[in-house]
Amino acid sequence: MLLSSLLFIPLLGILLICAGRSHERSTVFALSASAAQARRSRNNKTSGFAAASSDFAHSAGVAGPKSSSGHSFNILKLIALGTSILNLIISLVIYISFDFSSNQFQFVQEYHDMSFFDIYLGIDGLSIYFVLLTTIIMPIALLSNWNSITENITSYLIIMLLLETLLLAVFLVLDILLFYIFIESILPPLFLLIGLFGSGNKVRASFYIFLYTLGSSLFLLLAILTMSSIMGTTDFDALFKTNFDYTTQLFIFCGVFIAIAVKTPTIFLNNWLLRAHVESPLGGSIVLAAIVLKLSLYGIFRLILPILPKASLNYTYIVYLIGVITIIYASFSTLRTTDVKELIAYSSVSHAAVYLIAEFSNTIQGIEGSILLGLGHGFVSSGLFICAGGVLYDRSGTRNIAFYRGMAQLMPLFSVLFFILCLANCGTPLTLNFVGEFMSLYGAFERLPILGALAASSIVLSAAYTIYMFNRIAFGGSFSKFFEENISDVNKREFFILFILVSFTVLFGIYPSFILDGLHYSVSTLIYSIS
């Protein structure tokens, strides 16, 4: 029941939030009605206009009920946060109980009483790390927007908890059709999250992410239907044992890779990500960068490598070429941008291209490195977005790097945490990103030396744009006029969030065996199935 509880606990949190909100509204209505009746009896000798004005003011919530709304919203936030923390605890219990010496799905749950299809839930040595990443990031995403979301708070909390359920379902289902259904079910909550709580061109950005990803997923659906029509099943375990002929593999590979290329995203297919990151609320940017971008990483492990081994081996050079072009394009685009959130978004595209290349290396080092880099990017990108959108933007109201300077004088604690995250983003030793990037590029070089060497340019380019960003923000003279009224270092909430992300990045960078020891058997089994 542990896996199903991961899916149902956020839904239970949604029900509690809805119940709490409806109870508050009914209480406010009852208090307003009783207060109005008392005033009528007390002011029966007062003029009609004065009594009516008093009734209107109290029924509108100007007095009494309005004062308790802030407290009730804090309770709703605590319910959402407690729900996500409970999910984190359950995922840690699953991790502790997991047998990493087995290549089988564990904690398997089967539901045969559904109307249209059976539901199978399970977890293996690869998906468990994506589940842990999701349950770690979701409480951080909720805390990051703790005070900045002031309208439609109930809707925001419901959307975030619904996203957690759907993202976890993607990593837990053992059916390829359900995998598609849940991965597409993420789009409506993301659409609402950006459209309701974003900034600037939020409606345009929400339509971009919806149309890009939905359009590409039609090719994925066609590939899934092809596999289902040939095999008569959509079960992952059965498809892993299938040997499609080369022509069929090529056709299915094209459909799946188009969807993967958009969700990574690769060159010419990344407009949706840039607009979504720039206009999204902070919590949405964190979920997008840390979890949603990892759906392509996970999708390759499930849909391409074990099911389409011939096509993946023969067309590795095409994937490498696309990845190298994406790295160079995204890195140079990062060097020219002035929007700090857009800069971090371009950086995410570049790092995603690196672990895309590593996945197709057909080496243990490359595949393990891609997972480490994906996890490290999840922690570092979340921290950078919190620094940019949760600290600097909240205090200045602008995302233009040209207006940031001298923060090391005013915000020393923030500058230290920001500096460590920037070092991790560069792939500096003793960080998880360094281990992941080194292993990824080593595996890529071993598979195709020339393209692997070109992919290594990401090390130099990422250092260039990251150092440029940190230098402009932390140094560069006296502080900007945008900070004159809101000069303050990170508060306790911001420090707690950033410290957790920095700790994960550094500790796993110093001792990566904590993750690698659990990956060895699953990755070796995957390599054996490809060969």
Image (cartoon, helix red, strand yellow):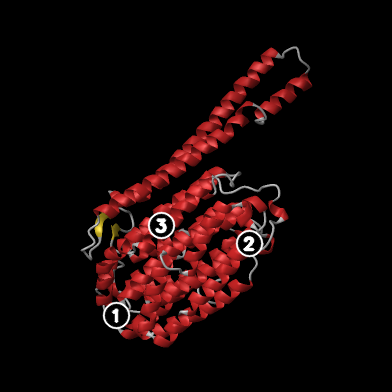
Q: Residue at x 46, y 71 (%)?
A: 352
Query: Disc number at residue 154?
Result: none
**What residue is disc 2 on?**
475
- Say what secondary structure mark 3 lies in: helix
Q: Residue at x 25, y 61 (%)?
A: 105
**What residue is disc 1 on?**
244
Residue type marked 2 = Phe
Query: Disc number at residue 504?
Result: 3
Q: CA distance from mark 3 to mark 2?
A: 27 Å
Residue type marked 1 = Phe
Label 2: few (<14), some (14–19) or many (≥20) C-alpha neighbours in 10 Å: some
Q: Nearer the viewer, residue 189 or 124?
A: 124
Can you see residue 166?
no
Of badges 2 and 1, the one in the foreground is 2
> Where does the C terminus fall, quadrant-wise?
bottom left
Residue type marked 3 = Phe
